[in-house]
Image (spheres, helix red, strand yellow):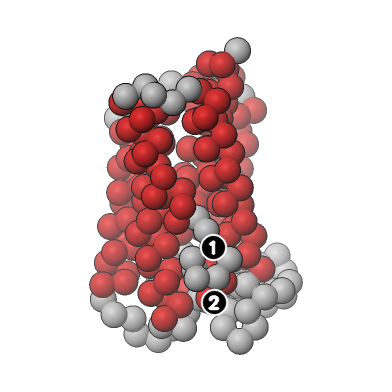
Amino acid sequence: MPNLPLYIPITFVITSLATVLLFYKATNNSKTTLFVLLAWLGIQAGIGLSGFYTVTDTIPPRFLLMIAPPFLLIIVLFATAKGRKYIDALNVKTLTLLHVVRIPVELVLLWLFMNKTVPELMTFEGRNFDIVSGITAPIIYYFGFIKNKLNTKVILLWNFICLGLLINIVVNAVLAAPFPFQQFAFDQPNVAVLYFPFNWLPCCVVPLVLFAHLVSIRQLIRRSK
């Protein structure tokens, strides 16, 4: 991976830690949650620095070690009684504000494209419209939870739309990575996420953003009944 301007990894590390801290706040300051998340970031930092993920011709791809554990954990949390109790105790207001981190994530992706480590389709100049979620998050937070001007259905609809935007870029990013099943961006594959600190995007930031939407949707649907 070519040397990047220092501001790019620094911005991304700060963004990742901010995502973790906002989620920690949404758990009502659960030290166990914070420990698990920081430990996971530490483990993935070590793996990313070792170059393990840069070997991309294996089946199954090593990339699964980044994404499988958090997604399996999300499934377990929704599938078990203790997990659902944890989910229902989370603060939807803070989870809504958490989506603001999608703004600096999109800026980092743009900078990575300019430095030829991700394809244009992963930026808001391509197929990635996820920045809309980050821009609108403080609006939903303020008018939905501070001023109470938005009803539950509007906030629920926003979550579904932003979840769709997230799924769109995740699918495109995976299919643009240099794996055996790559479909897009052969001239400039998505290689940044194979290196630290950008491997924190698929292993932590994206799962937390996804989980925030799923938790909010569950709580809002239950609240509207």
The part of the image, by quadrant, that contains residue 63 is bottom right
Residue at 56% x, 16% y is 224
Element under disc 2: loop
Numbered circle sitting on residue 128: 1
Q: Residue at x 54, y 62 (%)?
A: 128
Cα gap from disc 1 to disc 2, whole angstroms: 11 Å
First of labels 1, 2 by sequence position: 2
Which residue type carries mark 2?
Pro
Mark 1 or 2: in front is 1
Q: Give the number of callouts.
A: 2
Hey, which residue is sitting farthest top in the picture?
225
Extreme residue toward the front, this view: 149
- The picture places residue 87, in percent across and down from the top left corner, at 49, 26
Quarter occupied by the C terminus: top right
Which quadrant of the rendered structure holds the N terminus?
Answer: bottom left
Q: Which residue is mark 2?
A: 119
Q: Within 10 Å of the Cα at label 2, are there few (<14), some (14-19), or many (20+) other Cα atoms?
A: many
Is residue 68 left or right of 51 when viewed as pictured?
right
